[in-house]
Image (spheres, rainbow, N blue to C red):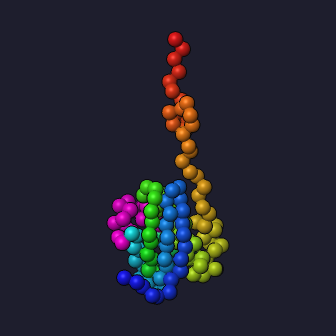
Amino acid sequence: MAEHQPYYYGTGRRKTAVARVRLFPNGDGTMTINGRNADQYFGREVLSAMAHSPLRQVEMAGRFNIRVKVAGGGVSGQAGAVRHGLARALVRADEEFRPALRRAGFLTRDPRMKERKKPGLKRARKAPQYTKR
């Protein structure tokens, strides 16, 4: 199923999730994630709204069809990655969207990652229980 119509591309990342977003102009506003509807894929309305937020920010909801391939992480991280990739694709579509998306913080890659486990500890910071005697 090769689509040869022009599209705008953006890559979004969050924690360990990576989203590859394609924005097809002159669409009806459908967002397909890994072959499924966005609402169905995320299961929670909050995550779906988070993924759609860049479109609402620039008032372009319903103007593009969006196809996303996302891998890694959990559903929350994936929603963040889709939001980041969608914002980047919108900037490629029209450079005038950049200030509004930048102000909303959608173009900034969230650098927070899971902290690594340290030797001698049970988790990143949790120490074994201390016993005095």
The secondary structure that dominates the magenta segment is helix
Residue occupying image coordinates x 39% and y 73%:
32
Q: Residue at x 64, y 67 (%)?
A: 103
**Residue at the image point whose x is 56% and y is 51% from the top:** 113
- Work out which quarter of the rendered image holds the N terminus and state it: bottom left
Res. 125 in view: yes
**x and y, in percent, of residue 50 in the image:** 47, 64
Residue 6: x and y in percent read 50, 87
Q: Is residue 130 above or below residue 12?
A: above
In the image, residue 116 sits, relative to residue 119, either above or below, namely below
The residue lying toward the viewer, choosing from 11 and 48, is 11
For residue 49: magenta? Answer: yes
Q: Residue at x 44, y 80 (%)?
A: 65
Q: Which residues are magenta?
A: 35-51
Image location of residue 105, percent across then percent down: 61, 64
Estimate the x, y position of residue 76 in percent, counting from the top left. Answer: 45, 57
Q: List the single residue furthest toward the front.
A: 119
Q: From what the image shows, is residue 56 above or below residue 133?
A: below
Q: Give the left or right position of residue 75, taking residue 87 as reference.
A: left
The reply, left or right, for residue 89 in relation to residue 38 is: right
Residue at the right extreme, as displayed: 99
Residue 104 is at least partly visible in this image: no
Position of residue 28 in the picture relative to residue 133 (left or right):
left
Q: How many tags in the picture?
A: 0
